[in-house]
Image (cartoon, helix red, strand yellow):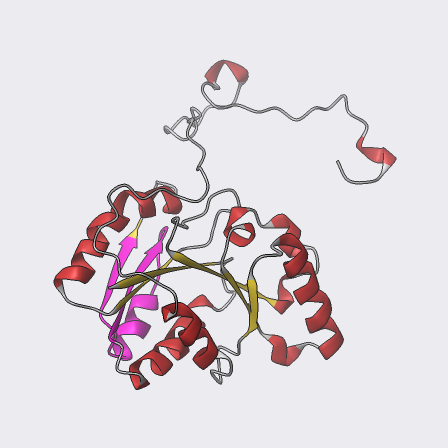
Amino acid sequence: MKLVTFSGPPSSGKTSVILKTIDSLRKRDITPAVVKFDCLYTDDDVLYRKAGVPVKKGLSGSLCPDHYFVSNIEAVVDWGLENNFDLLVSESAGLCNRCSPYIRDIKAICVIDNLSGINTPKKIGPMLKTADIVVITKGDIVSQAEREVFASRVQAVNPKAIILNVNGLTGQGCFELSTLLTESMEDVVSLKGKKLRFSMPSALCSYCLGETRIGESYQMGNVRKIDLKKDDNKGGEH
């Protein structure tokens, strides 16, 4: 079984792209399944089920969804192996720009849309910077010039990535993506010994542990303070 991870900001079109790509995979007699990780709520599992795709859903609740992902992905992969799927797609919540659910030697796809803002690629951390493939969506509602400028901003952030424009509504570009998902990928028999591509924040602050009171005396663990003595009015990037 092959494993791929999809990530990207909320509402970038991850689920639509995955569903259209699955259509292309099925035409090649590849049997896919999906695991959807989210925080508090998602009905994406209903969409996958309607499309006849086996799916598992995990809601992290009060935990970071990417931490929740890495705590559960091994068991989910075992589920995929037990059911003899050809390809397991892991779709993240995409809520954290600091974390990334990508695993070394496992193909990683970041989905980002043309409407997210010209500086958005710079704001997204390892989720974009360490992806193998960057899928850019919603290109049908911006101009050619805007598409090209946005793609160049993405490429500047991640020069090694394959950039692919995909229409999540029509499926244009999904056949090419389905080919990229399955080529040069080894089958996964276990995630034992695998590592993430990027470390997640490891230290907790008191608010992670349920503290609600405001004040320095209640702040413990991983605490960072704004440098208010620094003059931010001189312009330029810091």
Is residue 32 part of the magenta span, yes or no? yes
Residue 61 showing in the rendered view: no
Q: Residue at x 28, y 42 (%)?
A: 71
Q: Residue at x 42, y 24 (%)?
A: 206
* The magenta segment: 31-58
Residue 169 drawn at (x, y percent): 48, 81
> In the drawing, does residue 226 fall left or right of residue 135?
right
Q: Classify 166 as above or below 128.
A: below
Q: Residue at x 27, y 61 (%)?
A: 187
> In the drawing, does residue 128 fall left or right of residue 229?
left
Camera-side residue: 120 or 205?
Answer: 120
Q: Classify 184 as above or below 171.
A: above
Camera-side residue: 151 or 107?
Answer: 107
- Extreme-right residue of the structure: 234
| Picture quadrant where residue 136 is located | bottom right
Q: Quadrant of the C terminus?
A: top right
Q: Classify 30 as above or below 77.
A: below
Residue 110 drawn at (x, y percent): 49, 60
- Extreme-left residue of the structure: 82
Residue 139 drawn at (x, y percent): 62, 76
| Picture quadrant where residue 32 is located | bottom left
Residue 94 drawn at (x, y percent): 46, 54
Q: Residue at x 54, y 16 (%)?
A: 216
